[in-house]
Every structure is written in C-alpha cells, then in structure tokens.
Image: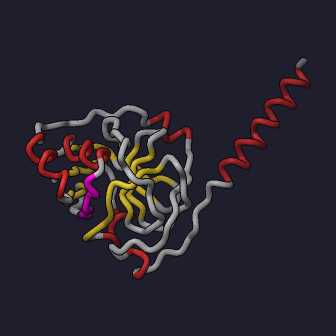
C-alpha cells in the first residue's frame, strides 16, 4: 500500500511538472513589442495554483459609477494604474461587460503581483465575461483570467488561453508595466 502511495505521489509530481513547464512564455521583450498596438491573434495560457490560493480574495474599494458605466456602452474609457513609486500606466477599455464591471469598481486599491516572466496581476471583484472577447496575443493587453478572477497586465508576449478575456490595451506607459510594484490604485 505504501509503495502504491509513493508511485501515485511521484506520478502527480511528474504530471504537475509537465503541466507547469508547458505554461512557459515566449521571451521576446523589446521596446518595439511594448507599443500600444496589438500585434497577433491568440490567447494566454498560465497557471500557478500557489498564487491563486494566496490571492483568491482581495478587499476592493468601490464607488457608484453607474453614470460612467451607462455612457460606456458606446464609447471606450481610459483607466490609469499607478503604484506608490509613481509608475503610471494607462489602458483603454474595450466596452465589454467585463470592462464595464471593472470600471464600476473604480477607484480600486489592491496589491499588484509578479506572475511568470511576462505579466503583472491583481484581483478585483468577479467580472461578467458574457460578451467579452477572448484576449488576442499582444504585448500591452489588459485581460481577465476567469478561473482565478485576476486581471492581467501583459508586458511581454504570452500564449493563448480560452479562459482569458480581453478588457483593453495599453495606451501610455507600456514600457513601465513590468515596473509596477506593491500597492496600486486603478482609477478612471
């Protein structure tokens, strides 16, 4: 029985290792790739259970932005992400239901985290992805990874994923996404 448990544990470790190694990223950072213009078509594939477990819930400050949200249906909004060091990045939201949900939660103050070698993440309240397009692989994409409930700011290329929804793209400060650290404030 003990040998069977050992074999099963080893098989789980091998499976987990293979799964995580398959989640690697393309590593092609350059000043040109950090422009605000999307470059290719696909979605991201990253998993990290430790990060998800440690950050599954985050307190979010919310305000009533019903007027902003209702006027967003036919226009795009710009949000600003700033950390305590003054690093500032702006994203243009795409007007999807998930983008509207994020906008309705602003201003939002949360911790930003490094994830993998290509992204920064934070945890808002749950976003509705009902009419939200899948993320297109492009440096500077702002996306929502539905299984973990995190918003992802990509500063390098990434792999496609059918659970990654596009919220918008960077319009200013794209070269500074990877510099964001600590507590960030997201505002409209």
Residue 86 versus residue 113 in the image, above or below: below
Q: Report the side of 101 relative to 45 (left or right).
A: left
Name which residue lies at 45% across and 62% down: 136
Residue 40 versus residue 1 in the image, above or below: below
Q: Report the side of 32 relative to 109 (left or right).
A: right
First to last magenta residue range: 88-95
Q: Report the side of 22 relative to 147 (left or right).
A: right
Name which residue lies at 81% across and 36% down: 10
Say which of 181 and 187 sits in front.
Answer: 187
Q: Report the side of 55 relative to 43 (left or right).
A: left
Name which residue lies at 46% across and 50% down: 164
Q: In the picture, residue 30 is in which quadrant?
A: bottom left
Q: In the picture, residue 150 is in which quadrant?
A: top left
Q: Is residue 92 magenta?
A: yes
Residue 160 place in picture, x, y as percent? 54, 58
Residue 45 place in picture, x, y as percent? 56, 53
Q: Is residue 148 magenta?
A: no
Residue 53 versus residue 142 in the image, above or below: above
Q: Main secondary structure of the magenta part?
A: strand
Give the colour scheme of this rendering.
Answer: secondary structure
Residue 180 place in picture, x, y as percent? 33, 59
């Amino acid at each position: 029985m003990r040998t069977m448990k050992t074999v099963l544990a080893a098989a789980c470790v091998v499976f987990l290792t293979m799964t995580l190694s398959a989640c690697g990223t393309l590593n092609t950072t350059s000043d040109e790739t950090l422009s605000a213009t999307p470059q290719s078509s696909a979605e991201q594939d990253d998993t990290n259970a430790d990060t998800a477990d440690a950050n599954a819930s985050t307190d979010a400050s919310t305000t009533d932005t019903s007027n902003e949200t209702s006027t967003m249906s036919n226009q795009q909004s710009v949000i600003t992400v700033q950390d305590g060091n003054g690093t500032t990045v702006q994203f243009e939201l795409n007007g999807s239901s998930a983008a509207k949900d994020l906008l309705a939660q602003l201003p939002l103050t949360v911790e930003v985290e490094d994830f993998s070698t290509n992204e920064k993440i934070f945890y808002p309240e749950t976003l509705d992805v009902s009419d939200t397009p899948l993320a297109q692989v492009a440096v500077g994409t702002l996306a929502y990874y539905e299984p973990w409930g995190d918003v992802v700011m990509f500063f390098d290329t990434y792999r496609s994923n059918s659970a990654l929804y596009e919220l918008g793209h960077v319009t200013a400060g794209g070269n500074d996404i990877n510099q964001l650290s600590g507590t960030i404030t997201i505002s409209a």
